[in-house]
Image: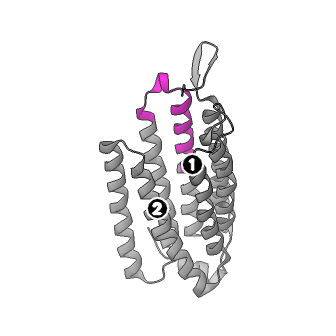
Amino acid sequence: MDIPTYEFMGLQITEPFTWLTNWLVAAFVFGFGHFLYRDKQADATQKFWSIFFVFIGLASLTGGTAHGFINYVGHNFHYTAWILTGMAVFAAELATIQLIENDKTRAVIRIIIYAQLIVMVGSVMYLNNFNSVRINSAIGLVGVVIPVSIIHYLKHKDKRSILIIIGVLSNLIPGAIHAFKISYNQWFNFNDVSHIVMIFCFYILYRGAKQNVNIDLAKKLSKATA
């Protein structure tokens, strides 16, 4: 199938809707990150989630540019977007381990996720395969964020944790759209559909990250450092 191409002011724009929807995702998540970081009641967990959204925004900007202007920036731009996505997952993991109250456990998991980040970056650079991003995301979100959030919710009934879990799981929907290539037509394809759905999924994560735990618990958890 030919790549949809649109000429604008002498520029050959490939996959124009994928470019635009990627940048639309970036606009929303940059906003989410900004509001989280500027929240006067933000604790360590919320700050790291704001960093997550910043990296997602950068990945979306870079990925959108790669899709729209591949003839000018080259395929390596995709690899940059993949690494930035891995950095976002890393930030989500750092946000979540702030909820671990046992210092030794938190320290061990921190070492593991730093090693995970190094492996992910190395695999993207040497294998040049998007599966590196998929595997890293699965390990980080399903292997770290969800279990820690479940444990924390069961112990403290913290609304933040349950919304984070729902937000992470909701991202399976755009993942399925992408995997099964559910498209409207050649121009508005599975990439574009998944990007639109993704905005709503990230909004759930934003609402979860924005929830403030009770003051005593927040003070206790904010002592954890990454």
Mark 2 surroundings: few (<14), some (14-19) or many (≥20) residues within 10 A: few
Q: Is residue 56 left or right of residue 144?
A: right
Mark 1 surroundings: few (<14), some (14-19) or many (≥20) residues within 10 A: few
Q: Quadrant of residue 26?
A: top right
Q: Report the span colored magenta.
A: 56-77
The foreground one among 118 and 71 is 71
Q: Position of residue 158 (x, y in %)?
A: 64, 79
Type of the residue with mark 2: Ala
Type of the residue with mark 1: Phe
Asked if disc 2 and disc 1 are in contact, CB closer than 8 Å, the reply is no
- Give the position of the C terminus as an image quadrant: bottom left
Q: What is the image's colouring?
A: one colour
Specify the farthest residue to the top. Answer: 10
Residue at the image point whose x is 66% and y is 67% from the top: 208
Q: Is residue 178 left or right of residue 207?
A: left
Residue at the image point whose x is 55% and y is 26% from the top: 3
Q: Position of residue 174 (x, y in %)?
A: 61, 52
Q: Quadrant of residue 211?
A: bottom right
**Mark 1, residue position:** 180
